[in-house]
Image (cartoon, grey):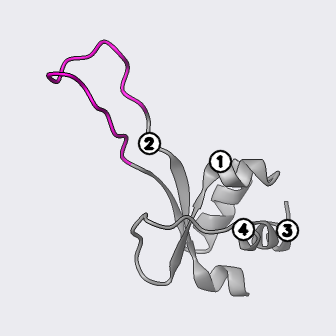
Amino acid sequence: MSDEKIRKLLAGITPTPFIWVPAGNLVILVTNVEEAGGDPAEVQAWVEAQGGYEDRTLPVVSTRRGVTSVPKPVGKRYYVVPEKALAA
């Protein structure tokens, strides 16, 4: 994907609220990028070239008495995208 296609793709996805990131950045879930037809590896490379990064939410596990045989879930992946990168 070209830089402009990735920029348009990300600009068309509603940022995810409630995940703290430094001011001037947006959170975009990797699943939303996939649903919009984007290639996560290409988008990640673009985001990193713009000064952003990929991160993951902390998984939430509820167990009874702290013991479980169920594997712990993995947090959701998301990109932290500098707002200025989408405005260019």
Instruction: Name the residue tied to disc 1.
Output: 31
Q: Nearer the viewer, mark 3 or mark 1?
A: 1
Q: Indicate the amino acid at tag 2.
A: Gly
Residue identifier under label 2:
75
Q: Nearer the viewer, residue 35 or 42?
A: 35
Above/below status of 75 relative to 22: above
Q: Residue at x 81, y 72 (%)?
A: 8
The dominant secondary structure in magenta is loop
Q: Residues within 10 Å of mark 1 (few under 14, many from 20)?
A: some
Residue 67 at x, y percent in the picture: 19, 18
Calculate the distance from the C-alpha at mark 4 to the C-alpha at mark 2: 21 Å
- Residue type, label 4: Leu
Query: CB of mark 3 within 8 Å of CB of mark 1?
Result: no
Q: Earlier in the sequence, mark 4 or mark 2?
A: 4
Cα distance between the residues tagged 2 and 3: 27 Å
User: What residue is disc 4 on?
Assistant: 10
Of badges 2 and 3, nearer the viewer stands 2
Mark 3 secondary-structure assignment: helix
Q: Are marks 1 and 2 in contact (CB under 8 Å)?
A: no
- Decide which of 48, 77 is in the foreground and name it: 77
Q: Is residue 39 visible?
A: no
Residue projecting furthest to the front: 64
Q: Earlier in the sequence, mark 2 or mark 3?
A: 3
Please give the name of the residue rendered at 34% of the width and 40% of the height, measured from the top-left corner: 60
Instruction: State the residue position of label 3.
Output: 5
Disc with the residue nearer the chain's start (1 vs 2): 1
- Residue at 38%, 20% (x, y): give it: 71
